[in-house]
Amino acid sequence: MTHAVAAPVDRALELLAGRPLVALTGAGLSTDSGIPDYRGPGSPLRRPMTYGEFVSGPAAQRRYWARSHVGWARMRRAVPNPGHLALADLERRGVLQGLITQNVDGLHGAAGSRVLVDLHGRIADVVCLSCRAVSSRADLQARLAEANPGFADSVGPGIETAPDGDVLLERTEGFRLVGCTACGGPLKPDVVFFGENVPKDRVARAYAMVDALRPVAGALLVAGSSLTVMSGLRFVKHAGRHGVPVVIVNRGETRGDPLAALRVDAGCSEVLSAVAGACGGVVIDTPIPEWRDLAP
């Protein structure tokens, strides 16, 4: 397959017309909701905390949670943008058979998407590293505020927000941690950090979504991902190996371009809204029991 080059929106609409779709989304989809991405054009070099750093001890955890305490108050105010809403609309009409997201912001669920694999988890959940109990990030926010009165207010609005819901805050020494309410153990956001493996059941369900496109002549639609990490790229590779056409919507080149039928170099909100509009009142009835029966 030839290397995909930037193509106009109408070519994407022509290729996708009448096909059942599965979508794979990345951080570029949420930029119109005010959440910065990692690798979009003009994005600064970012170095998120790795899993190894986080589990190294209280100092790293204090740094993470201090930054997250401030950033969460901002991220939780984000609302779905037209791209999220377009995908939810396509799902309601049976055109979009499933959605795999690398994002942790929860905006697909807020938009109404239900057939969804949160590949990297959700920032709205917290897990205990000792007993594995899962709890609410909103509840933790209240506990952190009680333990650190005035901390969030002391940080000025000029501090930059990072893609994973924290802020680029340097001084965190005095921040007080709180532990699991069940066992007192250390808490971690229930998301996949760099250097941590995606749970196998999520990967299996996402592969099954892509596999189910083959017998119904479907297509994989990638939106807002540079596909730099294998976490998302593997599904594009899988589609390519099995003859499932791939359309990529992203500002700038991606690692998946050599495997794609075409790439549209444009904003996700613009293109996904056009895809939803082009489908009009079409309803595609192609149930896919192979993966719908798998546990989410």
Image (cartoon, rainbow, N blue to C red):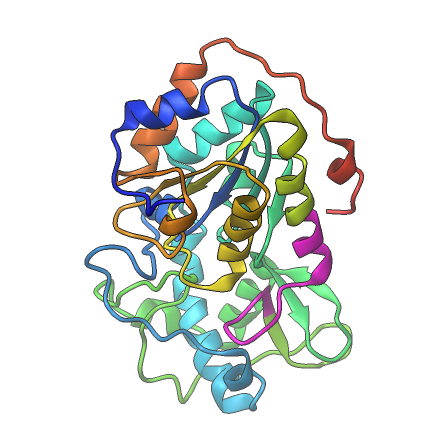
Between residues 200 and 4, which one lies in front from this camera angle? 4
Task: Give the quarter of the image for residue 159.
Answer: bottom left
- Please determine whether, in this image, residue 198 is positioned above or below residue 294: below
Residue found 54% across the figure and 37% down from its top: 244
The reply to whether residue 150 is visible in this rendering is no
Left or right of 217? Residue 6 is left
Q: Quadrant of residue 210?
A: top right
Residue 156: give x, y in percent of width and height. 25, 67
Q: In the image, what residue occupies the spot 72% across and 30% down?
A: 288
Image quadrant holding the N terminus, namely top left
How many discs mark residues in the rendered view?
0
Q: Point out the stretch of residues depicted in magenta.
A: 189-205
User: Whole-percent x and y of residue 29?
Assistant: 38, 44
Q: Position of residue 74 (x, y in %)?
A: 38, 55
Q: Is residue 208 above or below residue 138?
A: above
Horizontal and vertical percent for residue 31? 32, 47
- Name the residue rendered at 31%, 82% in the picture: 170
Residue 226 picture quarter:
bottom left
**From this viewpoint, which residue is outermost toward the front?**
1
In-front residue for pair 11/50:
11
Q: Of residues 139 and 118, which is closer to you in this image?
A: 118
* Identity of the residue furthest to the top in this view: 281
Q: Would residue 288 be visible to someone looking at this image?
A: yes
Magenta includes 185? no
